[in-house]
Image (tube, rainbow, N blue to C red):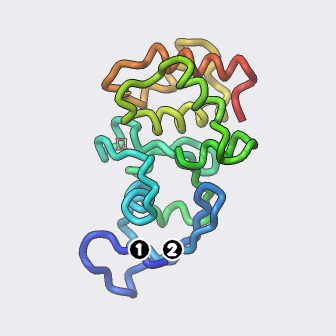
Amino acid sequence: MLIESGSPVAADTRVGISLTINGQRRDLQVAPWTTLLDLLREHLDLTGTKKGCDHGQCGACTVLVNGTRVNSCLALAVMKDGAEITTVEGLAALSGEGRNSLHPIQEAFIEHDAFQCGYCTPGQLCSSVGLMNEGHAKSRDEIREAMSGNICRCGAYTNIVDAIEDVMGQGGGR
Ligand code: FES
Ligand code: FES
């Protein structure tokens, strides 16, 4: 698949990369300056991942790269060649119960009313899964600290921490 970003790109400047995105392998030809965020949103129609600041300051663009949370606005797609990418669209499949079942953290966000407008929510969800994969945060304060890169303008922080604590209490999700 040919990916162009912005103005026309000479064929010899494109770089071939291969990514597994939400379980599906994609072979892509990308302009070297294409961010992972733009690749997902503008070229692959995975618009669940949001662009907020585009400068690494809000966390709206958080996705999982090989299970680690990453600000996709700061990552060039070519730097992730060979990686497994999970976006909010793919979180449900991580539950192991198929795409029609929500991931436990998604269920917990609903149960705990952990969003209002929802703009930050895809990033909050991916960051929450990354946090649980890391296994460092144990207390509410540690969860808050570890989630501090994800800004919520609606101020749903308390309920977000409630949701994460809930899933961690169930064994940390999947
Ligand atoms: S859009 Fe990437 S951190 Fe804000
Ligand atoms: S729910 Fe609105 S920005 Fe977080």
Report the side of 157 relative to 5 (left or right).
right
Q: How many marks?
A: 2
Q: Residues within 10 Å of mark 1 (few under 14, many from 20)?
A: some
20 in relation to 11, above or below: above
Disc number at residue 63? none
Q: Disc 2 versus disc 1: distance between alpha carbons?
A: 7 Å
Tell me if I can see residue 165 in this picture.
Answer: yes
In contact (CB < 8 Å): disc 2 and disc 1:
yes
Q: Which residue is mark 1?
A: 3
Judging from the image, what secondary structure is the residue with disc 1 in? loop
Q: Residues within 10 Å of mark 2 (few under 14, many from 20)?
A: some
Tell me if I can see residue 142 in this picture.
Answer: no
Quarter of the figure with residue 85: bottom right
Disc 1 residue type (three-letter): Ile
170 in relation to 91, above or below: above
Q: Residue at x 63, y 37 (%)?
A: 102
| Quadrant of the rendering where the C terminus is positioned | top right
Q: Position of residue 27 (x, y in %)?
A: 56, 74
Quarter of the figure with residue 101: top right
Q: List the single residue furthest toward the front.
A: 100
Q: Residue at x 35, y 74 (%)?
A: 4
Disc 2 residue type (three-letter): Leu
Q: Position of residue 92 (x, y in %)?
A: 63, 42
Q: Residue at x 48, y 66 (%)?
A: 78
Q: Which residue is mark 2?
A: 28
Report the side of 94 relative to 35 (left or right).
right
> For ligand 1, which image quadrant applies?
top left
Quarter of the figure with residue 137: top right
Looking at the image, tell me whether mark 2 or mark 1 is earlier in sequence order: 1
Q: Position of residue 99 (x, y in %)?
A: 66, 47
Report the side of 26 relative to 159 (left or right).
right
Judging from the image, what secondary structure is the residue with disc 2 in? strand
